[in-house]
Amino acid sequence: MAPVPISSIKVGHIDDVQELRNNRPKTIPERFVRDMSERPTPAMTLSPPSSDMPVIDFSKLTKGNSEQIQSETLKLAYACESWGFFQVLNHEVDLTLMEIMEKSSREFFMLPLEEKQKYQMAPGTVQGYGQAFVFSEDQKLDWCNMFALGIEPQFIRNPNLWPKKPATFSETVEVYSREMRKVCQNLLKYIGLGLGLEGDVFEKMFGEAVQAIRMNYYPPCSRPDLVLGLSPHSDGSALTVLQQAKGSPVGLQILKDQTWLPLQLIPNALLINIGDTIEVLTNGKYKSVEHRAVAHKDKDRLSIVTFYAPSYEVELSPMQEFVDEKNTCKYRRYNHGEYSKHYVTNKLQGKKTLDFAKI
Ligand code: OGA
Ligand code: NI
C-alpha cells in the first residue's frame, strides 16, 4: 500500500454507497451494475460449505508441547497449500480490543459524509476514505466504502488521514495494529517451519515489514445480484489478517476449484490468507487465492483487514528450495516496492496483478 499520488487520473463521479443507500435505497447507478459474467450467480448458494476450511489453534503453536507444535504446523502447512485461507482461534489478541476496533470502525463509517471526507482518498492513492483501485471513468465500482491507513514503517503514514473522530479511533488502530503485527510474525514463523525452512527466514528476509490496515464497510444493497462488494483480487501482501465484525452476514467468497465459495466465519476467529509475496517465494507451492465480497440485501457488513508485507527495498524471487526440474522457476526477481506500486496503481482484477512477476 505505497502512497502513490497520480495527479492526472480521471475517475469521474463516484457515488458514496452509504449515501446512496440512505437517500435512494432502490437506485443502483449504472457504474455499480456488473457485466453478466461478473455478477454473483445464484449457483453459489449450491456450492459446498466452507466448514472444511482448516482452523488453526494458535495456542498449540505458541504454547503447545513439541507434538502439538508439530501437528499444528502440519495442519497449517496443509491449510496454506490446499486452501490459501484458514481461520485462527486462540490467537492471543484480546477479544475486547477486537470489539473496540469494530466499534470504532463502525462509528467512523457512521459519521456524516463531510466529516469522513476530511480524510478523502485522493484519486489513484490507497490511503484514506473512499474507493481504492479506481483509475478510469468507465471502471465498475464496488459496493463498499473503504478507510485505509499505512501503519508501518512510520514513513508510510500520512498523519493528515488519521481521524480526530471518533476520539479514540487512532489510538485504537495503533494498539490493534501492534497486536496484528505479532500475529503475522508468529504465523510466518510457523509457515516457514511448515515449509521446512529453519530460523525465521521470512522475518529476516522482510526487513522492517510494511503493514497497512483497511476497514471495508458494505452497506445493504437492494440488488445484491447485480453488484459486487469487492472486486475479485489476490492480496499484494505476504499475509493478510481479516476480522469480520460481529453480526455481519456471509459476504467473502474465495475461488476454490473454479467456484466461488462463501466463507462462513467463526465468531472471534481471525481469517488469514496467503498473499502474492508468499506465492512468489514458494514458487507457487502456496498460492495467493483469489477472493471477492458480495453485498447483502438487508444487512451491512464490516471487515477490518491487516496487510503484512516485506519492506519496499527487498528483492524477491522464488527461494531455491522450491525450484527444481519438476518445479521450474515461475517468477522473476523483482523489487517489492515496485510490485507494491504496480499493485496499487492497477484496478483489482483477479490474479492479473501478479503477471508483473510471472516468467
Ligand atoms: C481485502 C479483502 C474482504 C472482505 O480487503 O483485501 O479481501 O471481506 N476484503 O472485506
Ligand atoms: Ni483481499
Image (tube, rainbow, N blue to C red):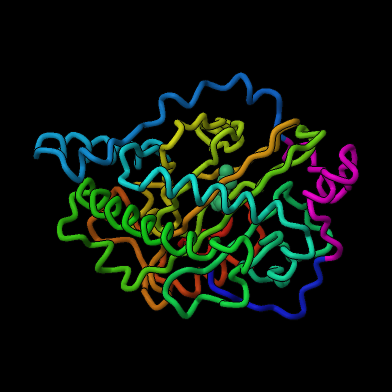
Q: Position of residue 284 (x, y in %)?
A: 38, 50
Residue depicted at x 20% and y 38%: 60
| Quadrant of the rendered image containing residue 115 | bottom right
Q: Nearer the viewer, residue 80 or 327?
A: 80
Q: Position of residue 157 (x, y in %)?
A: 52, 75
Q: Nearer the viewer, residue 62 or 288?
A: 62
Residue depicted at x 29% and y 50%: 187
Instruction: Tell me, yes or no, whether the highlighted magenta stretch contains residue 302.
Output: no
| Quadrant of the rendered image containing residue 38 | top right
* Residue sticking out furthest to the left: 66
Residue depicted at x 20% and y 60%: 200
Looking at the image, residue 182 sits to the left or right of residue 246; the answer is left
Residue depicted at x 61% and y 67%: 163
Q: Magenta residues?
A: 12-39
Q: How many marks?
A: 0
Above or below: residue 115 compared with residue 287: below
Q: Nearer the viewer, residue 348 or 332?
A: 348
Instruction: Tell me, yes or no, whether the highlighted magenta stretch contains residue 26.
Output: yes
Looking at the image, residue 210 sits to the left or right of residue 244; the answer is left
Above or below: residue 306 compared with residue 89: below
Looking at the image, residue 112 sits to the left or right of residue 272; the answer is right
Q: Position of residue 92 (x, y in %)?
A: 30, 46
Q: Position of residue 148 (x, y in %)?
A: 59, 62
Above or below: residue 118 compared with residue 91: below
Looking at the image, residue 316 sits to the left or right of residue 1; the answer is left
- In the rendered image, the quadrant that contains the C terminus is bottom left
